[in-house]
Amino acid sequence: ETENGGWTLIQNRQDGR
């Protein structure tokens, strides 16, 4: 669940940056 370069409202899960 990434849309803003890797961080969204669900960054707590997995940030793809």
Image: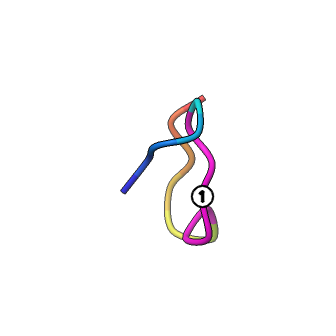
- The image quadrant that residue 4 belongs to is top right
At a point 62% along the width and 70% down the height, the residue shown is: 9
User: Where is 12 relative to 4, above or below?
Assistant: below
- Residue extending furthest toward the front: 4
- The image quadrant that residue 8 belongs to is bottom right
At a point 56% along the width and 37% down the height, the residue shown is: 6
Q: Nearer the viewer, residue 12 or 9?
A: 9
Looking at the magenta stretch, what is its main secondary structure? Answer: loop
Q: Nearer the viewer, residue 8 or 14?
A: 8
Left or right side of 4 for 3: left
At a point 51% along the width and 68% down the height, the residue shown is: 13
User: Where is 14 relative to 17, above or below?
Assistant: below
Provide the residue span drawn in magenta.
6-11
Quadrant location of the C terminus? top right
Left or right side of 10 for 3: left
Left or right side of 16 for 17: right
The three-letter code of the residue at mark 1 reads Thr
Q: Is residue 10 magenta?
A: yes
Q: Specify the color scheme.
A: rainbow
Residue 2 in the image, given as x and y percentages of width and height: 44, 47
Residue 10 in the image, given as x and y percentages of width and height: 55, 70
Q: SS class of the residue under badge 1?
A: loop
Number of numbered labels in the structure image? 1
- Residue extending furthest toward the left: 1
Q: Which residue is mark 1?
A: 8
